[in-house]
Amino acid sequence: MTRILHRQIHNSYPLAVGGKGVEIFDADGRAYIDASGGAAVSCLGHGHPYVTAALHAQADRLAYAHTSFFTTEPAEALADRLIEDAPSGLSHVYFVSGGSEAVEAALKMARQYFVEIGKPERRNIIARRQSYHGNTLGALATGGNEWRRTQFRPLLVETHHIDPCFAYRYQQPGETDQDYAARAAQALEDKILELGPESVMAFVAETVVGATAGAVPPVADYLKRVRAICDRYGVLLILDEVMCGMGRTGTLHACEQDGVSPDIMTIAKGLGGGYQPVGAVLLGQHIFDAFAKGTGFFQHGHTYLGHPMACAASLAVQDVIRRDGLLDNVKRMGAHLTRRLGERFGNHPNVGDIRGRGLFIAVELVEDRSTKATFDPKEKLHARIKREAMARGLMVYPMGGTIDGARGDHVLLAPPFIIDAPMVDAIVERLGDAVDAAITGVKT
Ligand code: PLP
């Protein structure tokens, strides 16, 4: 009997004992294709020799040095690398141990920035429905899933949520992308005006929405409009690229494809590729300068920030992505995956949408394609798909998203960047069988 409090108390999980390339092996010798990179984490797959060698070397040299006393070579080198490749304007890095910590730090950074520049009245956070920003109290308050927040509500800071830019669900028939981008961005301006511009601190958004809604990219121009609105009212733009960042969409940062730079950006997951728990906040020079001229430090900190092992692993992961030209493979294999999913599911009566960028692709399941009606949430189709997929040796990341108050279902695919075409084909074949078996289970 397990002594671990797992997320789902009544589920029993296979015992993972090994991993190589795009597969994980359990104690019974079964192999699972890691088609989701865990939760969009394992960008280099498992057991990558370059990364494990870097980890061994760092463990031998120096496993830990507290940041109140020292900086370290891997932390400095990783910070240099991240800024070298960062969207324009981002000049400094703050290290943490994961995505929620990154979002939490980003929120505190935004708040301290306004205090430092003498605008303490700026404290309102605007975020979007159907988003996920983490599970610590600040990040949870920012996320746009009411069902996650309800029981913690008296403890959460008040955050204001607007509709996301989600073409499949909210773009109206006949509405052009341009018009929809303008309408979706207008929701932000309206909310800023409603709250009073001088009270608003930040707008927080995932560049490409991850697990909650399933790889939802913004329509062209939406983020440019958002950037312009933030600039007009002096609101900081925080882009959360914890899931969609670090190459997952085919460019190192997803926002490069939208031609937008945030004031603050959060990254994690693919940064260390699962070889170490790590995250980071990238911040603009204006924020750094406000801290430097004001208090002289960022009033925050965790014991393991800038951990040498975490930074060494992350640097090795980023080295491999660069050295092996893996962003090109993400683009190539992403296009192949989308094509193959289209062939398998394009005419499927219960597949409403196939969307995403790079190797960050989701398939949305609907009971009725013409009305886009979701399956009854009580059927937990997403959980059935996960079970059926695991039984076929396939890891996918299915979720019941939040759609118009009802929970719809989608499957998120985020395989390692090293994947090849035969493995992509195997994913699509197994997923097709798993989806059909799960839907048959719902209907019978
Ligand atoms: N932000 C986004 C967009 C995420 O997808 C996640 C995790 O899924 C987080 C933040 C929280 O990251 P973590 O689970 O590492 O705390």
Image: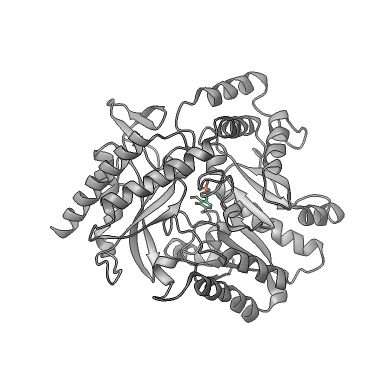
Residue 74 shows up from this direction: yes
Q: Is residue 166 left or right of residue 56?
A: left
Q: Where on the picture, by quarter, is residue 36?
A: top left
- Quarter of the picture containing the C terminus is bottom left
Q: How many marks?
A: 0
Q: In x, y percent, where is residue 425?
A: 31, 39
Above or below residue 355? Residue 48 is above
Question: Residue at image x 49%, y 33%?
Answer: 44
Q: In x, y percent, where is residue 32?
A: 32, 34
The outermost residue toward the left is 444
The outermost residue toward the bottom is 194
Above or below residue 93? Residue 45 is above
Residue 6 shows up from this direction: no
Q: In x, y percent, where is residue 225?
A: 61, 69
- Quarter of the picture containing the N terminus is top left
Looking at the picture, tell me which residue is in the foreground, 380 or 423.
423
Q: Is residue 21 left or right of residue 298?
A: left
